[in-house]
Structure formats: structure tokens, C-alpha cells
Image: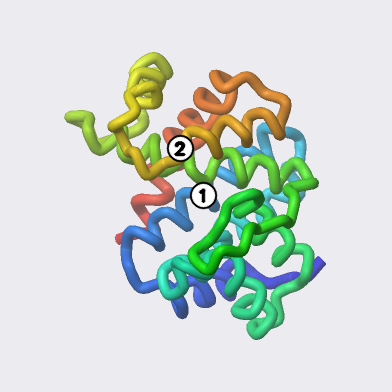
Amino acid sequence: MNHITREEALDLLKKYNKELFHIQHALTVEAVMKWYAKELGYGDEADYWGIVGLLHDIDFELYPDEHCLKAPELLREAGVGEDIIHSVVSHGYGITVGCGATIDVVPEHEMEKVLFAADELTGLIWAAALMRPSKSTKDMELKSLKKKYKSKGFAAGCSREVIERGAELLGWELDKLLSMTLQAMADSEDVINQQLQ
């Protein structure tokens, strides 16, 4: 296991990502991954899960058409271990990117399955939170999230198919994935906001 520190991972993220939206997404997925690690009994690996979450979209801002294809190069250059690289690339599993290549790195470890399932979903939950008077996930209920989830036009860029495949990979009902990820975001919201100041 490569011991890249969180600080190094954050510096690396910011080297390739300047848009606040992308940094916020990375911090959100990091927090959600750490929450899941603790919740699923991997508490001693929480920082590691978080670093994978932080770096998962490292190549997306600069190379959207080579997403998950460019990441290994950027990460290797920075001395990041192959285990982290495998996990980062696996969240693109089965997704075809701009240059016609399909990512075939399968999410194997439970952490990779959580990343695959929760990544898209955090975007959808965040979009739903922004529609609320409070602009927060803390007062959002599962039923209002489900309503937004079922509305095809809402956050259309967030692939329901990927989210559902993620739940399937984990062997979970969709409701479990939705309610846990919502809880993870609500619990982490203050920490994320603090880091964005």
C-alpha cells in the first residue's frame, strides 16, 4: 500500500483541478468514502478510502474525453501506488469514454464498489439539496430524494443506470444505497463546507 498522505493527495488534486465544482465533488466523495469505511467495518482504512475518493476524478477536468484513461499516468507520475490507481480507474467500469475505449477494470474490493455506486449519486443528492430552501442535505428526507431520483429530467447528467449497477455490485437494495449516501453527505456537510472556505 502506498502511503500518500492526505495533504499530498489534496495538492495533487489541486494541481490538475482548478474549478471549485470539481474540488467540492472530490471533497464530498472523500468524506462519503470515509463515512462508509467506518459504517461498513473498515474504520482503520478510512483515510485510505478517503484518499481514493479524493483522487477518483483527478483527470476529469483537464481530460474529460480520457477520463480514467489519463488518471494512471498522472498518479504514477506522482508516485501513487498501483492499488490506489486500480481503485480510481475501477469507478469508470463499463463506461465508454470519449476516445471510444471502455474501462474494463472491475471494482473488486468493497471500497471500489462503494466508490462506483456513490460517486454519481453524490452529484444527484447535491443537485437535490441545492433545490431546497436550506440548500442543505441535513433536512432532506429519503422520500424527497427518491422523488427527484425518479424524475428523469432532474440532474439528467447523473446516470441512474450507473447508480443501480453500483447497488447491484454491492448486493444492496437501491433504497439502502440512497439512504446511506444521503446520511453520509448530511453527516459530512459541515466538514466539506469548512474545507471550501
Residue at image location 40% in from the left, 20% down from the top: 146
| Residue 194 seen in the current view | yes
Q: Marks 1/2: CA distance?
A: 9 Å
Q: Which of 100 and 81 is in front in this view?
A: 100
Asked if residue 98 is positioned above or below residue 152 in the image, the reply reads: below
Under tag 1, what secondary structure? Answer: helix
Viewer-side residue, 155 vs 122 = 155
Q: Is residue 178 above or below residue 12?
A: above
Q: Residue at point 41% right, 69% down?
A: 61
Residue of label 2: 185
Mark 2 surroundings: few (<14), some (14-19) or many (≥20) residues within 10 A: many
Which kind of residue does numbered mark 2 sit on?
Met
Location of residue 78 by image quarter: bottom right
Q: What element carries label 2?
A: helix
Q: In this figure, which residue is indicated by the disc labeled 1?
A: 29
| Disc 1 packing (10 Å; few <14; some 14–19; many ≥20) | many
Residue 91 at what x, y percent from top left? Answer: 62, 52
Q: Considering only order in the chain, which callout, 2 or 1, is on the residue closer to the N terminus? A: 1
